[in-house]
Amino acid sequence: MPVSLVILILYIAALFGISWYAKKRSEGNNENYALAGRKLSAPLICVTIIGLAVGGASTIGVSEHAFRVGLSAGWYTIAWALGAIVMGLFMAKKYREQNITTITELIERHHGTGAVILGVLCQIVIQLVIISLQYIAGGSILHAILPDIFDFQSGMIVSAITFIGITFIGGMWSASLSNVLNIILIYVGILIATVIQFNKIGSMDNLAAALPENVPWFSFIDGVGPVTIASWCLTLITVNLSLQSILQISLGAKDAETAKKGFVWGGIIMLPVGVLAAFLGIVAKAMFPEVKAALALPQVIVGLQPLVAGITLAALWAADVSTACNLLLSAGTLFSSDIYKRFINPTCDDKKQLMVTRLCVMISGILTLGLAMTVSSILGTIMIGLALTAAFTMIVFVALFFPRYTSKAAGFWTLLAGLVTIILYKFCPAVRIFPNVIYLEWIVCIVTYIVVAMISPAKKESTK
């Protein structure tokens, strides 16, 4: 049996073992399952936000982009880190103090029912897009590890089964505790791969000589350019302030100060990962110039000694596991809390809601597997989906910092305007007056909220 297959089986077994252990803690009520009973420590918050951020986009996606443009692709993960730090410093405590379960619960305190329904649907769509990208990355990794056993599609299917199963069993406790193993694997694996491959090449001069001359491979700015870097930073800071899966991590903290510390330390610790993944993407270009970009990083690692290759590729797969679990959980939580319990069955007890959350996790996982079959570019797709969080950030920023100026009608219209902007930017080139949709998205959302608040200033009283 190949060494890589043995390592993969042992890793999957360890994940399910952790999940079954976590299941004991997650039973009883929906809060234990969705929010770990609000008992997460700062270290668990730290590894969970790293696990969410350092997924397929921050490893396989970054290396895929670096394969084309060079080291500057690593800015994607740096932007994630900056977003986590900003969330920790300014918003994590405030969210935790609200004693809510979902972001739309906060929106409902200051805005209308229409904003809640549209908000839930938009948040679920955003997270389903990101989950699908984890399947793509997971499929490419398994195919690279064991090409005789997995093709690209079967690799995605095995990834989906694992991601869904872990989340279904243990919820937030499962995601948090398994991230301790995942983060160790990710950092050790990528660091070992970087050191070994650089030693193989011998020097930076040798690496440069093996690369095409028309790309600024080692520039930290020029490859993607300052405009794209700024877009990534703005988008991912926005995402960290209002995406349900990130908010849900802060809500799982045992107190507000713990949430703050966990996010800040998580942001600091995740900074180097993107740079290492980008460097390995450059190495892949030098060693395998004709390989498919999405397979660049796995292909480089396959060439390592079997044991090291197996551990490193398991580490990359761990990145997908850690991200997908949180996203699946947050999608299920949104539907069960804000649609099922709010509109379908208001009298349901905790046991029934917990069952619905688990069912939603399974359904979301199956839907995203279908979506994954149609997506081509990891980073290109993810940035479009994430831009929609600008509307949520605008709404919750007013609710948390300026509650006196909230408008019941403005929430719905801001979300609708943000959604329409994304659609028009994608399908109507005439509206692309900015280099990235996030700029237009922010302008539209700010203007919409202010105008609607002026026209319809009626407030909805905040109730905690």
Image (cartoon, helix red, strand yellow):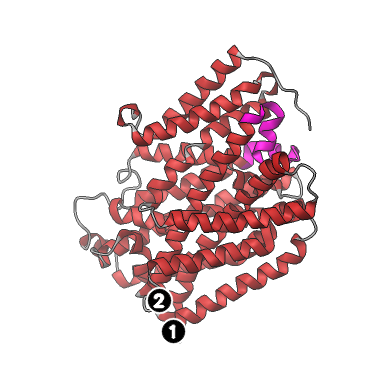
Q: Quadrant of the C terminus?
A: top right
| Residue at 62%, 30% in the rendered image | 114
Task: Judge left or right: residue 274 versus residue 43.
Answer: left
Question: How many marks do you count on the picture?
Answer: 2
Secondary element at tag 2: loop
Magenta-highlighted stretch: main secondary structure? Answer: helix
| Residue at 63%, 42% in the rendered image | 88
x then y, percent, for residue 353: 74, 51
**Residue highlighted by disc 1:** 2
Vertical arrangement, residue 415 with respect to residue 196, above or below: above
Q: Mark 2 and mark 1: span between their CA atoms? A: 8 Å
Say what amino acid the circle numbered 2 marks: Leu
| Residue at 74%, 44% in the rendered image | 345
Task: Judge left or right: residue 83 versus residue 25.
Answer: left
The quadrant holding residue 200 is bottom left
**Residue highlighted by disc 2:** 146
The quadrant holding residue 396 is top right
Tag 2–tag 1 contact (CB < 8 Å): yes
x then y, percent, for residue 257: 73, 44
Say what amino acid the circle numbered 1 marks: Pro
x then y, percent, for residue 339: 66, 42
**The label number, if any, that marks residue 394 in the structure image:** none
The quadrant holding residue 2 is bottom left
Vertical arrangement, residue 293 with respect to residue 141, above or below: above
Foreground: 192 or 451?
Answer: 451
Task: Judge left or right: residue 224 versus residue 315.
Answer: left
Q: Quadrant of the N terminus?
A: bottom left
* First along the sequence among labels 2 and 1: 1
Residue 56 visible in the displayed image: no
What span is colored magenta in the figure? Answer: 88-114
